[in-house]
Image (cartoon, helix red, strand yellow):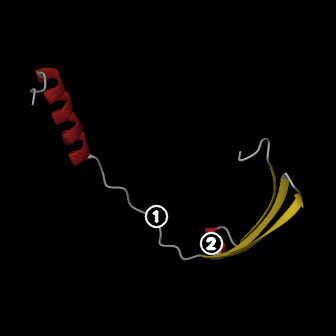
C-alpha cells in the first residue's frame, strides 16, 4: 500500500487535532413530543393517484406548542412503469 505524501499526513493530523479540541455539541433542553398521523390514497384515474396526509404534533407550549400538518399530493404516471 503506498504511503501518504507528507502534506496529506499533515492535513490528516490537523483534522484529527481540530476534532479533538472542538467543543462537543449539546442540546439546549430535553424535549418530549408525540406525532399522530394518517393518510389516505385514492385512485382518481388510471394514471393519477391522490394522496391526503394529515398529522398532529403534541408538545409543550414552551417549545412552540402544538402543530398541525396537512398535505395533498397528486401522483401522475407519465409513462408505463415510470
Give the position of the C terminus as an image quadrant. Answer: top right
In the image, residue 42 sits, relative to residue 38, either above or below, namely above
Q: Residue furthest front?
A: 80
| Residue 62, image x, y percentages | 62, 72
In the image, residue 69 sits, relative to residue 79, either above or below, namely below
Describe the element under mark 2 as helix, strand or loop.
Answer: helix
At a point 71% along the width and 47% down the height, the residue shown is: 81
| Residue 19, image x, y percentages | 25, 45
Quarter location, residue 43: bottom right
At a point 18% along the width and 26% down the height, the residue shown is: 8
Frontmost residue, 21 versus 3: 3
- Disc 2 residue crowd, few under 14, some 14–19, many 20+, Cα 10 Å: few
In the image, residue 72 sits, relative to residue 62, either above or below, namely above
Describe the element under mark 1 as helix, strand or loop.
Answer: loop
> Which label number is shown at residue 62?
2
Quarter location, residue 9: top left
| Residue 11, image x, y percentages | 20, 29
| Residue 3, image x, y percentages | 9, 27
Q: Are marks 2 and 1 in contact (CB under 8 Å)?
A: no
Frontmost residue, 42 versus 18: 42
Frontmost residue, 24 versus 43: 43
Frontmost residue, 43 versus 33: 43
- Numbered circles on residues, count: 2
Q: Is residue 22 left or right of residue 67?
A: left
Residue linked to disc 1? 28
Q: Is residue 10 left or right of residue 42?
A: left
At a point 80% along the width and 41% down the height, the residue shown is: 78
Give the position of the N terminus as an image quadrant. Answer: top left
> Which label number is shown at residue 37?
none
Amino acid at each position: 500500500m503506498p504511503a501518504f505524501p507528507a502534506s496529506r499526513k499533515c492535513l490528516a493530523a490537523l483534522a484529527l487535532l481540530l476534532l479533538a479540541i472542538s467543543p462537543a455539541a449539546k442540546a439546549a433542553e430535553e424535549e418530549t413530543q408525540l406525532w399522530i398521523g394518517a393518510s389516505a390514497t385514492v385512485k382518481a384515474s388510471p394514471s393519477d393517484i391522490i394522496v391526503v396526509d394529515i398529522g398532529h404534533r403534541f408538545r409543550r407550549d414552551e417549545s412552540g406548542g402544538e402543530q398541525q400538518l396537512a398535505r395533498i399530493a397528486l401522483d401522475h404516471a407519465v409513462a408505463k412503469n415510470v
